[in-house]
Image (spheres, rainbow, N blue to C red):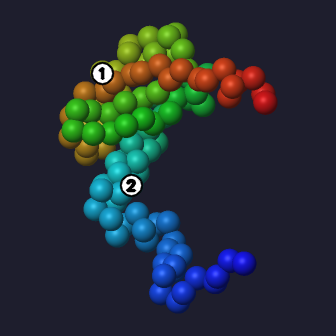
Amino acid sequence: MVAPPRSGSVPLPTALPLALDSHPVLARLREQIRGSRARLDAVVDLLPAGLRSSVQAGPLDEGGWTLLVPHGAAAAKLRQLTPLIEQRLVERGWEPNPLRVRIQRVSPLVTSGR
């Protein structure tokens, strides 16, 4: 027989946004995610139509901002567009930071349809 938890021993559930905002490290991570998504929203119209759905906002940190792409051809195209993307970000009020383009390898288990 399992004893019921004593009152006060189990913390009350907390909404995820509230929990993220109440912890300094998590709050900073949340802001970085928002900032990365906002940057992608600001430049998505500069991307070729066929590439837009495959580009993902990646990490945003002191070293710059990363865009994630599924393959080398997409990475090469984004690297060609880097000056234009960086210019757009400055025009929208963000500090000039290096743009990194990384190929995001997809696990075979994810692509197998299982």
**Image: 41 above or below 31:** above
* Quadrant where the N terminus is found in the figure: bottom right
Query: What secondary structure is marked by label 1?
Result: helix
On the image, the x and y values in percent for residue 107 come to 61, 23
User: Residue furthest toward the bottom?
Assistant: 7
- Residue in view at x 33 percent, y 39 percent: 60
- Residue in view at x 68 percent, y 28 percent: 110
Labels 1 and 2: the sequence-earlier one: 2
Q: Nearer the viewer, residue 77 or 22?
A: 22
Q: Amino acid at mark 1?
A: Pro
**Horizontally, is 1 left or right of 5 in the view?**
right
Q: Amino acid at mark 2?
A: Arg
Q: Residues within 10 Å of mark 2 (few under 14, many from 20)?
A: some
Is residue 93 shown to the viewer in this render?
yes
**Horizontally, is 5 left or right of 21 in the view?**
right
**Image: 82 above or below 96:** above
The residue labelled by disc 2 is 30
- Residue in view at x 22 percent, y 32 percent: 63
On the image, the x and y values in percent for residue 20 come to 40, 63
Residue 39 has which mark? none
The residue labelled by disc 1 is 83
On the image, the x and y values in percent for residue 99 come to 31, 27
Query: Given this view, does label 1 or label 2 mark the residue nearer the observer?
Result: 2
C-alpha gap between disc 1 and disc 2: 27 Å
* Quadrant where the C terminus is found in the figure: top right
Query: What secondary structure is marked by label 2?
Result: helix
- Residue in view at x 50 percent, y 74 percent: 14
Q: Residues within 10 Å of mark 1 (few under 14, many from 20)?
A: few
Q: Nearer the viewer, residue 81 or 98?
A: 98
